[in-house]
């Protein structure tokens, strides 16, 4: 038996039980303290959730509906979502666990729990839960397998992730996002040709998808030292330019080269990007990042005509963008800027 609870503690635990089970039926509570249980934070979050319910009409309405029918899956999922919106993630997770217990064959409930666990950086637990669900219910849908693939990818278990992605595609071969997910998993394993095939299929199903176009460009970058001059690199740029402007295309390709550790090629792509647009924010950020990585000055090589004027425009653009006071004429940009998102 758990001892030494104050009256307030007993009240909070009772409230938590009612909050999660909607006060319907009787549940047998183990007398042992659950492993990893941290009473104070849980009690405080339950108290906060109860207090929020008093002033939140949507939350009060959902709880009333759940009190009337504790097995109403849609209401419990909506209630969990409302708790997330209010910042009570632990309460939301417990509601989702109850949803899975009371609807053990529900794809939606298990995906919702996996999504919540993943958002809370509990990808290993999410993966185990989804894997167990697919064993218990072989009729699990494509979305379950897709999510299982994603959480396995998060843990860099690429082989297992690939297996899950392929099962998702076997059930739903016309989903472009499933082809893109498999392609990304293959790309991480160095299977560039297979990855490119998946990205092209995703683009056939969803033309001009920015994500698929960018991933295809990454897959087309070869491993050779002459990558910057290869036809595949030109093809990659062409794909990127089909969904964005030339400066952004070359800047994005530079990021791909940086990730691959090909700093000389990345520098060339940044230079090309800045020739298209000397004030391109992402290219400037990538130039600074590259300088930090390879220890070389953040300099560019402009055409012979107007070198000084070109550099002055670049420095002024950097000042306007980052508020930096790099002295004019220097070819080093000192900044705390981070690389722009692709």
Image: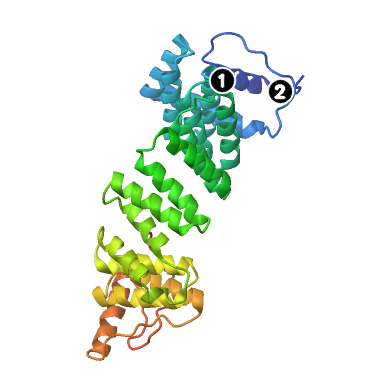
Q: In which quarter of the image is residue 287?
A: bottom left
According to the image, label 1 marks what residue?
101
Residue 120, visible in the rendered structure: no
Task: Determine whether 56 is above or below 157 in the image.
Answer: above
Task: Determine whether 290 is above or below 36 in the image.
Answer: below
Colour setup of the view: rainbow
Residue 182 in the image, given as x and y percentages of width and height = 45, 47
Task: Determine whether 7 is above or below 239 in the image.
Answer: above
Task: Determine whether 263 is above or below 196 in the image.
Answer: below
Relative to 30, 282 lies left or right: left
Cα gap from disc 2 to disc 1, whole angstroms? 28 Å
Residue 130 in the image, given as x and y percentages of width and height = 55, 32
| Foreground tag (2 vs 1) | 1
Q: Residues within 10 Å of mark 2 (few under 14, many from 20)?
A: few
Label 2 element class: loop
Viewer-closest of 313 and 105 = 105
Q: Quadrant of residue 280?
A: bottom left
């Amino acid at each position: 038996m758990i001892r030494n609870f104050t009256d307030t503690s007993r009240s909070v635990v009772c409230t938590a039980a009612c909050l999660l089970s909607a006060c319907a039926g009787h549940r047998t509570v183990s007398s042992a303290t659950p492993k990893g249980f941290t009473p104070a934070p849980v009690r405080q979050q339950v108290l906060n959730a109860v207090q929020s319910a008093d002033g939140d009409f949507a939350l009060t309405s959902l709880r009333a509906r759940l009190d009337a029918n504790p097995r109403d899956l849609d209401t419990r999922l909506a209630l969990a979502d409302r708790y997330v919106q209010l910042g009570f993630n632990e309460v939301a997770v417990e509601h989702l666990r109850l949803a899975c217990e009371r609807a053990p064959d529900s794809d939606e409930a298990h995906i919702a729990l996996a999504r919540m666990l993943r958002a809370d950086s509990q990808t290993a637990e999410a993966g185990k839960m989804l894997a167990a669900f697919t064993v218990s219910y072989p009729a699990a849908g494509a979305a379950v397998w897709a999510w299982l693939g994603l959480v396995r990818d998060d843990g860099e278990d690429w082989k297992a992730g690939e297996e899950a992605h392929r099962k998702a595609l076997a059930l739903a071969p016309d989903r472009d996002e499933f082809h893109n997910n498999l392609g990304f998993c293959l790309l991480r394993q160095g299977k560039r040709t297979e990855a490119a095939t998946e990205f092209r299929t995703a683009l056939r199903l969803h033309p001009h998808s920015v994500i698929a176009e960018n991933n295809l460009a990454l897959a087309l970058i070869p491993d050779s030292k002459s990558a910057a001059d290869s036809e595949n690199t030109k093809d990659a740029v062409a794909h990127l330019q089909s969904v964005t402007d030339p400066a952004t295309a070359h800047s994005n390709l530079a990021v791909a080269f940086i990730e691959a550790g090909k700093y000389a090629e990345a520098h060339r792509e940044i230079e090309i990007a800045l020739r298209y647009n000397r004030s391109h924010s992402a290219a400037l950020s990538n130039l600074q990042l590259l300088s930090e990585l390879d220890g070389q000055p953040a300099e560019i090589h402009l055409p012979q005509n107007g070198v000084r004027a070109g550099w002055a425009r670049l420095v002024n653009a950097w000042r306007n963008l980052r508020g930096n006071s790099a002295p004019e004429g220097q070819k080093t940009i000192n900044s705390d800027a981070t690389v722009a998102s692709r």
